[in-house]
Image (spheres, coloured by chain):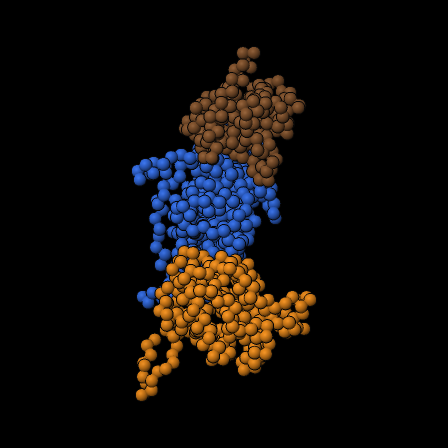
Amino acid sequence: MEKAHEIIFAGFGGQGVLSMGQTISYAAMIENKEISWMPSYGPEMRGGTANCIVIVSSSRISSPIISRFDSAIVLNQPSLDKFEHEVKEGGLLIYEESTIINTPKRKDIEVIGIPANEEAQLLGKKQVANMIIVGAFLAKRPIVKIENILVALKKVLPERHHHLIPLNEEALMLGQRLIKEKVVA
Amino acid sequence: MDVPTTLNGYELIYKKPSTLTEKPFHYCPGCGHSVVHRLLMEVVEEMGIQEQTVGVAPVGCSVFAYDYMDIDMQEAAHGRATAVATGIKRILPDKFVFSYQGDGDLAAIGTAETIHAVNRGENILMIFINNAIYGMTGGQMAPTTLLNQVTSTSPYGRNKEAMGYPIKITELLAQLPGAYYVSRHAVYTVNAVRKLKKAIEKSFAYQKLNRGTCFIEVVSNCPSGWKMTPVESNKWLEANMFPQYPLGDIKIPKD
Amino acid sequence: MEQEKTTNNEARLMKGNEALAEAAIRADIDAYFGYPITPQSEVLEYFTNEMPKRHGIVLQAESEVAAINMIYGAAGAGGRVMTSSSSPGISLMQEGISYIASAQLPCLIVNVNRGGPGLGTIQPSQGDYFQATKGGGHGDYHLIVLAPSSVQEMADFVFDAIRLAEKYRNPAMILADGALGQMMEKVVLPQEGSLPKVSKPWATVGKPASRKRNIITSLFIEPEKMEVINLGLQEKYKQIQSEVRYEEIALDDADIALVAFGLSARICQKVVDLGREKGIKVGLLRPITLYPFPKSALNKIADKVNFMLVVEMNAGQMVEDVSLAANGKCPVYFKGRMGGMIPSPEEVFAELMSIIEKQSVTQD
């Protein structure tokens, strides 16, 4: 792994944007890495746009707030419009296909659309779309191990939702598969 | 100070309680503060709770209450005595805690703290001296100043259109479920003094039950601020204050 | 029990506000009084959740004014107590803080700074530096002020602040900001019970026959007495200077010193990295205690660098103290953002480069 990986997760409140970042942060902690998770906060979280910056590093993290990212994961159009230009050259941009009308234009980064909402509906629970994206992201950038994401989910999800962990696992694996299929295709 | 119980064949029947310090009261002649201070300390002495009592002094004429009462005390910011008393009582739930405030302190600047302390049912005794005036700062209008009463900031008399009405904070507080015992008293006659002492005794006894706030209003005088002799001030008190602030229990424990 | 202790020490991922509250429970605070305000309401929520199950008293007051006066009463009664708020709420507390400083009551006040003035914004700011370090309320007094720059320090400084407050009978403040309160990082919490209670013979706990009564007051009406009280406070502040703390990063060979505290210092660490990658000898001094302020450390650095650049999330507050410390030995520049905006490392780096250009500093 490179020294530090800097990611922005962005979308609407309620899409699980903050918990995607948290899950990866917990997994990184289990692996003894340094982490910082910096959310946007305030009234905009109640249904508006939400984002979090996650930095996973093998050494002490300096600024938890940055404006250029190795990876951007965007789940709505305003977030794509805002963060497409903030991905470092050679970086990765993953977006949720059904929510994006104006697709990314940049050629100097890797751009991947994932039909996560549609796939999540097929799984029978649209709330796991974010885990499909996490699975896909980790297939491209294995900054933490998938099995540690499963351990992390136990921490991030409240006890009453623990019965959903198998479904989340299924979603993660599906995300990984979607990437592999794309690569093959 | 040890006082002999007999002197030249005479028997000692009246003395200063040991819970008052040697410092003479600075209060104006005829002022009710000294009587209330003394009553509080008599009760503390007689109940033997000097070691378990913590008081809170206000900002107002009784700002130096701690100079006279020989107990551990804290001096609060203007209006905040019940917040300070809350802090003390939460740390020392087994101690007897009382606050002592005037009308401006309790019913103007400290209204929020007053209402919420009672609403939480803080197990403290709140003593409220109502003399319808700001005594310490020189006789300005208080929230309890009567209609048409002349003060240095209502020189033409309190006018309800511009200055509102005298607030009956005691009746207001009695509405709150956190209030356990609410009573209004005076110190203008010997009989009234005796009744107030009983109310203070009851309030300290109730404090052990942890059932809520005890609140005692003392309708008092301010001869200097009212620009009267002590005797005149007591007459004025009866004629003008009592109709607005009638004496007696307002809320008594149901059990 | 052994099992529990190991769990106690394991690294956790926590928000700054939560780490602060958990550390306070582990520091055995007797009571917390507070009022909700963004971005630090998690502190009160954490206590209302945890304290009934563990130990300590938590009370949601009717206002910040009431909360700080409850702190006064509870600290005066010998309790180990704390409150927290964010900028507008801390403004409301200033009267009470002045009384607490005068009555010399130890307590912890946490300000999770947000942008102002006025109702302002809920986004992070360092606009309360003056208020925190110069007194804040009326009269000549100081708080001991610690500025964390990580979630770990949000936890650790609770212990440090309480220790200092009790040592000097002085209110101590943790000056954080909204981002530090809301962000999550790995944190190893201090051990529960590792901060022994100190004796407080001055506390109002009820007067036994064996001693004189204890009075907690800030009223000394004769100016002769009030001056003596003030002289005593000033003497104490002199002693407190020995508690100064700061962190130096890459300053040994530096030609340029960045100076920043809290979150700004984290941003500046990245600027140091960016500069060093380009061969610019830039280092960072991070004041950890804002009061006492690391004057002499800065004065020494001023001797050997070409210039200093102070970076703050305000209109330029600490820069005044840095300039006084540098005392004309080197130019002191300032870069700041206000109103809840956070300067990016790239932005600060660009500023640094433009100063270098202007200064024609030779690079090697």
In which quadrant of the rendered view does residue C114 lie?
A: top right
Q: Tell me, what hue is chain C?
A: blue
At 48% from the left edge and 29% from the top edge, which residue is drawn? Answer: A164
At 39% from the left edge and 56% from the top edge, which residue is drawn? Answer: C78
User: Can residue C298 be seen by looking at this rendering?
Assistant: no
In which quadrant of the rendered view does residue B52 lie?
A: bottom left
Please give left or right for residue A85 compared with residue C283 in the image: right
Q: Which chain is orange?
A: B
**Vertical position of residue A99 compared to residue B65: above or below:** above
At 46% from the left edge and 75% from the top edge, which residue is drawn? Answer: B195
* Depth check, front residue: B103 or A107: B103
* Depth check, front residue: A114 or B60: A114
* Residue ranking furthest to the top: A185
At 45% from the left edge and 62% from the top edge, which residue is drawn? Answer: B124
Q: Tell me, what hue is chain A?
A: brown
* Depth check, front residue: C320 or C115: C115
Q: Residue C213, image x and y in percent?
A: 38, 65
Q: Please state, as top left, top right, bottom left or bottom right, where the N terminus of chain C lies in the image.
A: top left
Q: Residue A185, image x and y in percent?
A: 56, 11
Q: Residue C44, image x and y in percent?
A: 48, 46
Q: Residue B49, image x and y in percent?
A: 37, 67
Q: How many marks can you see?
A: 0
User: Can residue A12 be seen by looking at this rendering?
Assistant: yes
* Residue ranking furthest to the bottom: B9
**Vertical position of residue B196 compared to residue A19: above or below:** below
* Residue ranking furthest to the right: B161
**Vertical position of residue C168 compared to residue B66: above or below:** above
Please give left or right for residue C115 compared with residue C70 in the image: right
* Depth check, front residue: C334 or A155: A155
Please give left or right for residue B172 compared with residue C222 in the image: right
